[in-house]
Image: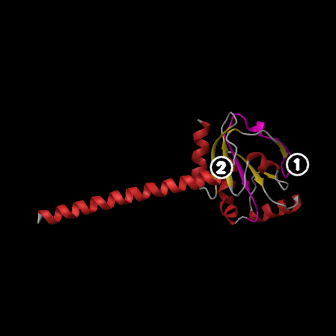
Amino acid sequence: MTEVTGNQGNSRKRRYIRWLLEGLVLIAILMVVHGFQTRNIVRGPAPEFQARLLDGTAVRLQDYRGQALLLQFWATWCPICRYEQDSIDALARQNAVLTVAMDELAEAEMRSWLDEQGVSYPVVLDAGGRLSGLYGVEGVPTSIIIDRVGDIRFVEMGYTTEIGLRLRLWWVSL
């Protein structure tokens, strides 16, 4: 009887070890994919820029010094961007958020689209790709977390949860 129980224990132990190894391989694959996707995005000090929000207000990256900033690159045609827009809007009510629309829409069309979606986060239109090129952004959505002194601390491409973004903003504001 103890021999059967011993074999079952060894079998269970091997299964747990196999699951652990498979999990580590999966994590390694995800890290390689993330590194590949974000390989061209600028690291270190965030490139300074000046732009104009949809409401006409001039904005500079320097305006956000002293606080953590979410710099979000997105597009109206991106389904993942639309899925996370409510999270970005909620974050913008309590945190420094600046979004960059990599879109070809005219300003009036973009304002109308934002009104239809019911979101009010600050938007810079980047139809020519100047800002996305400055930061090396090649896909959307891309979330860049910049710390209080202006250094890029986190870069995520693809869907990111609201809690994940909140935690990153909190972390860099310490």
Image quarter of residue 57: top right
Residue found 32% across the figure and 62% down from its top: 15
Image colouring = secondary structure
- Confirm whether the magenta stretch covers residue 71: yes
Q: Which mark is residue 39?
A: 2
Compared across the picture, whether 11 is left or right of 71 comes to left
Crowding at mark 1 (Cα within 10 Å: few <14, some 14-19, many 20+): few
Q: Nearer the viewer, residue 60 or 108?
A: 60
Three-letter code for the amino acid on which mark 2 is drawn = Arg
Q: Secondary structure at mark 2?
A: loop
The x and y percentages for residue 58 are: 86, 43
Residue 51 in picture, x, y percent from top left: 84, 45
Q: Is residue 72 left or right of residue 167?
A: right
Query: Which residues lie in the magenta part?
Result: 52-77
Q: Nearer the viewer, mark 1 or mark 2?
A: 2
Q: Residues within 10 Å of mark 2 (few under 14, many from 20)?
A: few
Mark 1 lies on a secondary structure that is loop
Q: Mark 1 vs mark 2: which is more N-terminal?
A: 2
Give percent across and percent down for residue 170: 59, 42
Label number found at residue 9:
none
Residue 23 is covered by the magenta coloring: no
Query: 127 or 53: which is nearer to us?
Result: 127
| Amino acid beneath label 1 | Gly
Q: Residue at x 70, y 63 (%)?
A: 82
Q: Is residue 122 above or below residue 44?
A: below
Real-space CA distance between mark 1 and mark 2, rounded to the nearest whole angstrom:
33 Å
Q: Which residue is the site of mark 1? A: 56
| Above or below 146: residue 140 | below
Q: With 167 as the anchor, is 74 left or right in this view?
A: right
Give the vertical position of 170 relative to 2 (above or below): above
- Quadrant position of the N terminus in the picture: bottom left
Badge 1 vs badge 2, beta-carbon distance below 8 Å: no
